[in-house]
Amino acid sequence: MSILDFFRKPKTKSYDDSDFGAGRVVVINNGVIQYIGSSDNKLSASQVYDMFGKIPTLFDAVEKISSRVAGLSLVLNRDGKVIKEHPVLELLNNPGKNISKTAFWDELSTSFALCYEGWLVARGNVSNPPLELEVMEPYCVDSPISGFRQNGLMPEKIKTDSEKDKKTYMKKLIDGIERYISEDGFSELIPIIGKRYKNDWRGMSKLSVLFEEAIHIRAGNVHNRSLLENGLTSSIILSSKNPDGIDPNKANEFKRTVQEQYQGSRNAGKPIFLPLPFEKVSESTNNKDMDYIQLINMDETRIYRVFNIPLALISDKAMTYSNLEASIPFLYSDAVFPVFNYLADELTIKLLPRYKNIDGFKLGFDKFEIPALYKHHAEMMKELKASQVLTTNEIRAKGGYEEIKGGEDVIIPISVQKLSEIDNVPGYPEV
């Protein structure tokens, strides 16, 4: 019996808890990924945040979104009317004594970008405007009721388990809006849920479709570090010197030793002590033999694409000054604005009704107060002016400027005339 026969059998590899959170992942070498007790790629919020803290590409992609959401200037708007001062804007700009506006929106947008979930606790009498707001991390929020995931509806009870808040909230229908109110009536839990897992109320993390990519990057980093620490090449192929093969019992012993002591990224580079006579057939010298660099580049590209980050911002090949400058507006339009707009729409529905005389207004942002887009607006105004189809005031509005007197007309070059009105044009017969 050849030693290779023992390695051709399907094997199951379990990534230990230190890989990504408390959940255990089972990967079978036929390409199927399974979680214990589940047959899909569902990730818990705890696992998602653990991956976020360990995968630099993932951290960078989310940070590029959340840091810019946190810098947006908040406004209320309705039918073209914009309000920049209002008690709800004051609250959202100064959410609490222990958290700044930047930290508040950074935490909230990070939560939504990672888990498609955002959770806020609004403190104060639930019949009045809130006194302060607190962001709850998704892994600190769950339901104490079993069996609620069968129909995909939001549960009747949701509890928080954080140093910032430890309460149980009951679902109540108030003025046609589902609200989660604490027993004492002085706290409200505001859920913001985006895409959901099938038959579930929890948000569907984008990392569910990026788990393999995250594993590649994580394991590759550990593999390289292990090579540096242990000082041996990445893989060796051995062949038995015995022409009749190996005794099955000894082969099993050797197989078990290899699996326990030498396989896996954490064991890369360990010296091998052979109990039987073998000869080395070949060995690889670096990860390029496995197209490692190409694999990691592909995985990182997939992560950035899922989060809609323009590749010109992260790709060495595409990162020219011209491409970098042109990609900034797309970073905002494709990645930053969608996250903010979803959060803003939900807060318009669930937070604004607690204020009076605000009907019809929506929470938004002032796009003209984004320094990175100043040049973009100026170039757009220049192009619109050259098109000769809009009035001066219409063009000024596109750049965030107020109307001016006499700006109701379209400006065209003074030299524009009809050919029939021009005498003796060179190259043309007289008219």
Image (cartoon, rainbow, N blue to C red):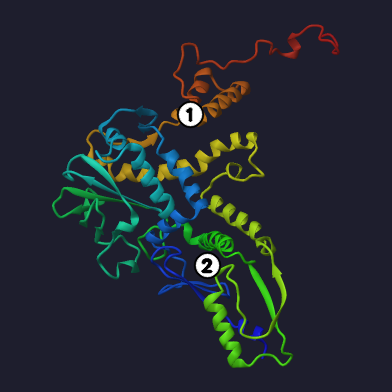
Q: What mark, if any, has residue 97 been given in the picture? A: none
Quadrant occupied by the N terminus: bottom right
Residue found farthest to the top:
423
Indicate the quadrant where residue 152 lies: bottom left
Relative to 405, 280 lies left or right: right
Q: What separation in Å lies between label 2 and label 1 (alpha carbons)? A: 46 Å
Q: Is mark 2 on a helix, strand or loop?
A: helix
Q: Which residue lies furthest to the left in this view?
A: 184
Q: Position of residue 430 (x, y in %)?
A: 84, 8
310 to the left or right of 364: right
Q: Identify the residue at image location x=56%, y=51%.
A: 305
Give the mark, 2 or 1, whose residue is nearer the N terminus. 2
Which one is in front, 274 or 415? 274
* Depth order, front residue of 8/150: 8
Q: Where is residue 423 in the image (x, y as percent from the top left)?
A: 79, 6
**Image quadrant of residue 197?**
bottom left
Secondary-structure class at tag 1: helix
Q: Which residue is drawn at 63% across and 37% down?
A: 323
Image coords of residue 224 (percent x, y): 58, 60
Under mark 1, the amino acid is Pro
Q: Could you classify mark 2 by the number of other residues whose Cα lies within 10 Å: few (under 14), some (14-19), or many (20 or more)?
A: some
Q: Which part of the image, by quadrant, shows the C terminus?
A: top right
Percent position of residue 341, x then y? 41, 42
**Of discs 2 and 1, which sits in the foreground?**
2
Residue type pointed to by label 2: Arg
Badge 2 is on which residue?
A: 266
Callout 1 crowding tier (Cα within 10 Å): few <14, some 14–19, many ≥20: few
Which residue is labeled 1 in the image?
371
